[in-house]
Image (tube, coloured by chain):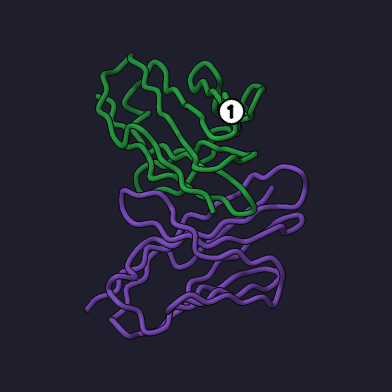
Chain colours: A green, B purple
């Protein structure tokens, strides 16, 4: 199994600013993912964080808006850039061994 | 494209009233089907992985089963603490570990 922590757990931000979310896994994992979960909705994959190379983004998500870093096999960051109220959501980090495990999420509110 | 459909969207049970949640899936080749539990404001908590038709797994009051087209999560004599949203997800065969989620079933167990 994998234990995943995220920081911050929640934040309230102003429109136009950026927020970086950190994700730490307690063991080395090959695959890390970032998801978004809007209120009352299921999980939507934003991107796969690749160690040593650029992230792979899903349709509808772009690097300029959601830059991702993956400096090693246990850590990743997601930045939400130039935020608008539509970015208010829960952002979840996930790590995959044979099973996909999730962090506790970061609840973001943009005013 | 992989698809996961869960039903019902919401389910309200009396304590002790057993029932089942359904997850229908379409995938080119199934590498794994996952069940998660998600409490409000928290990340999904892993419950089960099923790999092939006919497989069953149990944990306390929960039992997951798998056929070639769907999976069921059976809840026996539920308690109020079983109230949560239950998510189903599938991973297809191939080198990419992307997981596709359903929209979930929100379960409420009334004392």
Residue A56 placed where, x, y %? 64, 29
**Observer-nearest residue: B22 or B57?**
B57
Where in the figure is residue B75, as x and y percent of width and height?
Answer: 43, 78
Mark 1 closeness class: few <14, some 14–19, many ≥20 residues within 10 Å = few
In this picture, residue B35 sits left or right of residue B69: left
Residue at 48 percent of width and 72 percent of height: B21
Count of residue discs: 1
At horizontal 57% and vertical 75% (from top left) the residue drawn is B57
Element class at badge 1: strand
Asked where in the image residue B76 lies, by quadrant, the reply is bottom left
| Rendered view: A80 above or below B80 | above
Q: Position of residue B31 (x, y in %)?
A: 71, 57
Image height of A17 relative to B19, above or below: above
Q: Residue at x 76, y 43 (%)?
A: B95
Residue annotated with mark 1: A72
Q: Residue at x 52, y 55 (%)?
A: B102
Residue found at the far front of this picture: A27
Quarter of the image that includes the C terminus of chain B = bottom left
Q: Is residue A10 left or right of residue A56?
A: left
- In percent of width and height, residue B77 lies at 37, 84
Quarter of the rendering containing residue B38 = bottom left
Q: Against A103, is B111 above or below?
A: below
Q: Which subunit holds the residue at mark 1?
A: A
Q: Is residue B98 left or right of residue A108?
A: right
């Amino acid at each position: 199994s994998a234990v995943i922590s995220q920081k911050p757990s929640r934040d309230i931000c102003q429109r136009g600013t950026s927020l970086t979310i950190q994700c730490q896994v307690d063991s080395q994992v090959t695959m890390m993912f970032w998801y978004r979960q809007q209120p009352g909705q299921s999980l939507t994959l934003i991107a796969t964080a690749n160690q040593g190379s650029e992230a792979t983004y899903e349709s509808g998500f772009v690097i300029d808006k959601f830059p991702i870093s993956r400096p090693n096999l246990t850590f990743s960051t997601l930045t939400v850039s130039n935020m608008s109220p539509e970015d208010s959501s829960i952002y979840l980090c996930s790590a995959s061994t044979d099973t996909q495990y999730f962090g506790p999420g970061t609840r973001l509110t943009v005013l | 494209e992989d698809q996961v459909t869960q039903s019902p969207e919401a389910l309200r049970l009396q304590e002790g009233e057993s029932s089942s949640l359904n997850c229908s899936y379409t995938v080119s080749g199934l590498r794994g089907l996952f069940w998660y539990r998600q409490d409000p404001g928290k990340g999904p908590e892993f419950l089960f992985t099923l790999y092939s038709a006919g497989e069953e797994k149990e944990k306390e009051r929960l039992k997951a089963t798998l056929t070639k087209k769907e999976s069921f999560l059976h809840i026996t004599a539920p308690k109020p603490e079983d109230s949560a949203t239950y998510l189903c997800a599938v991973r297809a065969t191939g080198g990419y570990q992307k997981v596709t989620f359903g929209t979930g079933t929100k379960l409420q167990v009334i004392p």
